[in-house]
Amino acid sequence: MSVPGAAPRTVHVRVPATSANLGPGFDTLGLALSVYDELAVTSLAPGELEIEVAGTGADEIPRDASHLVVRTIRYCYEAVGRPVPGLRIVAHNGIPHGKGMGSSGAAVAAGVLAAKGLLEGEAELSDTDMLRLATELEGHPDNVAPALFGGLTIAWDENGVPQHKKLLVHRGVAPVVFVPDRTMSTSTARSVLDAAVSREDAVFNVSRSALLIAALTQSPDLLLSATEDKLHQERRGEAMPETFALVRALRSRGFAAVVSGAGPSVLVLADGPGRRVAAAEVVAEIGGGAWQPLMLAVDFKGGTVRTSPEAAALEAKTEVLS
């Protein structure tokens, strides 16, 4: 059933995984990675709700109004003063859940992009609007910014308004994420952090964050030094000792390894495909098969939304995989 007086509209949304912090860039830096959630979202009559999910973590995802994409779409409609339609959502999730790869940020970004597409011709959502709305829901812009815009993003707050700058990553940077079976909630990972840091540690991280921008955009050979951190990773290691042990083991062998987001996955920013393969060999040797390597690329495009009959193809794909 369509919204009275209006034809139903279907939009197709695709959003990348992300890795936040990247070592020293706590709550500031984020990188979009080539693993994706895809959704077909259709407007229905008010009050109707249909949700189909396949792929990673499908059994754990709610099929009611608590679904994060649904909550985000409704939030966006209310923000621009438009009546909220009913929704049909058909999703195929590729981003691992609870593994430090930005799954919740991707869901929020997907909801914002879906709202943008469904509202086309009625209300406009600018890039600034989308980042603000996504940050209000997610709490921090470091994951939602790269999910929305792609590449390497620097996020900051200016007079209460989240801002971002997108940078292109040097073609020599080759990411690999090592994903364990266990999960870690962001709230748990944040709860172990100190409320204050020393001036020495703050200066250390400022210098490494600045160096990391140069390493990722111009000089990948500097990545090992540039990913050093004294603010959060060691403390988080208390809650996920296996993750921190792997980070230390990889770094001792010269690999730029960091906790991916809030963990428990480990991100290696290799300075070339050969070094990425070498990192995977080390993890296979010392990890006892407990870590799944994801050989990824940096996603430069970010989230996309389009109104297209091709969205129906996603429904067919989901039905096959269900």
Image (cartoon, grey):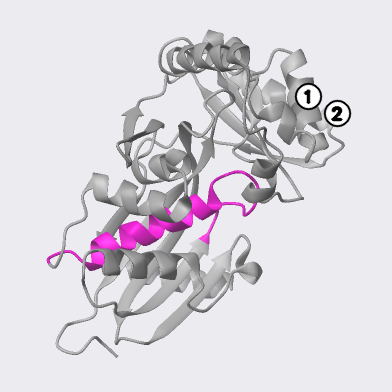
Instruction: Classify mark 1: residues with Cα within 10 Å, few (<14), some (14-19) or many (20+).
Output: some
Distance Cα–Cα, label 2 vs label 1: 6 Å
In-front residue for pair 200/146: 200
Q: Circle 1 is placed at which residue position?
A: 282
Mark 2 belongs to which amino acid? Ile
Percent coordinates x, y for residue 266 in the rendering: 68, 34
Percent coordinates x, y for residue 188 in the rendering: 69, 48
Residue at 65% in and 70% down = 59
Q: Circles 2 and 1: CB distance less than 8 Å? A: yes
The reply, left or right, for residue 214 in relation to residue 125 is: right
**Where on the picture, by quarter, is residue 322?**
bottom right
Instruction: Classify mark 2: residues with Cα within 10 Å, few (<14), some (14-19) or many (20+).
Output: few
Does residue 51 show up magenta in the picture? no
The answer to whether 268 is drawn above or below residue 75 in the figure is above
Percent coordinates x, y for residue 214 in the rendering: 43, 12
The reply, left or right, for residue 39 in relation to residue 284 is: left
Q: Circle 2 is placed at which residue position?
A: 286
User: Magenta segment, which residues?
Assistant: 93-121
Label 2's element?
Answer: helix
Mark 1 belongs to which amino acid? Val
